[in-house]
Image (tube, rainbow, N blue to C red):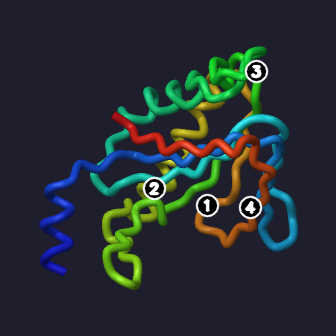
Amino acid sequence: MYHRLIKSLLRKKYMRLVVQRVNEASVSVDNKIEGQISKGALVFFGCHQKDIPEQIISLAARLVHMRFFPDNEDKMNLSLVDIKGEILIISQFTLYGDTTQRRPYFGEAMEARGAEKFYNLFVEEVKKHGLKVETGLFQKKMLVSSINDGPVTLIVDAK
């Protein structure tokens, strides 16, 4: 336990996204579809226990303006805003799992109540950019399906 504490103090942690470029994606809970999108991004959202709400605005802007969609020359020059892409955001505390041991340790992830607040704030901030945004259900067992495009998967940490 002591070595984990030392390692966590030495590493800076930030709110984290795993972003996948998709042709379609959906999330269901108890066999009911809760969110579904076509061309756009499947986003897994996780926050660290030391994150602050001020990071949310810039992280949402980075997500929607990040150029990871192909232009006419097949170069990644277009953003979600440019293509009017859709976004499916899923809460994912396991993004802060420490896997240095055989069993992952999730002590650095933000506790559930704070994480839900940050997740909802992030979703609302992304919606301000005028794109279709769908979500899963916080703290529920979800089944996520996607048809990845590329595949393109990016890890985005808040600054």
- Label 1's element? loop
Distance Cα–Cα, label 3 vs label 4: 23 Å
N-term mark: 3 or 4: 3
Distance Cα–Cα, label 2 vs label 3: 30 Å
Distance Cα–Cα, label 1 vs label 3: 28 Å
Specify whether 96 is left or right of 125.
left
The residue identified by callout 3 is: 83
Expressed as whole percent of the image width and height from the top left, the position of residue 116 reads 51, 55
Residues at circles 4 and 1 in contact by the CB criterion of under 8 Å: no
Residue 65 falls in image quadrant: top right
The residue identified by callout 1 is: 138
Rate crowding at label 3 as few (under 14), some (14 to 19) or many (20 or more) other CA atoms within 10 Å: some
Q: Is residue 133 above or below residue 1?
A: above
Expressed as whole percent of the image width and height from the top left, the position of residue 44 reads 58, 51
Rate crowding at label 1 as few (under 14), some (14 to 19) or many (20 or more) other CA atoms within 10 Å: some
Q: Amino acid at mark 3?
A: Ile
Expressed as whole percent of the image width and height from the top left, the position of residue 56 reads 44, 35
Q: Amino acid at mark 1?
A: Phe
Rate crowding at label 4 as few (under 14), some (14 to 19) or many (20 or more) other CA atoms within 10 Å: some
The residue identified by callout 4 is: 144
Residue at 32% of width from left, 71% of height from top? Answer: 107
N-term mark: 2 or 3: 3
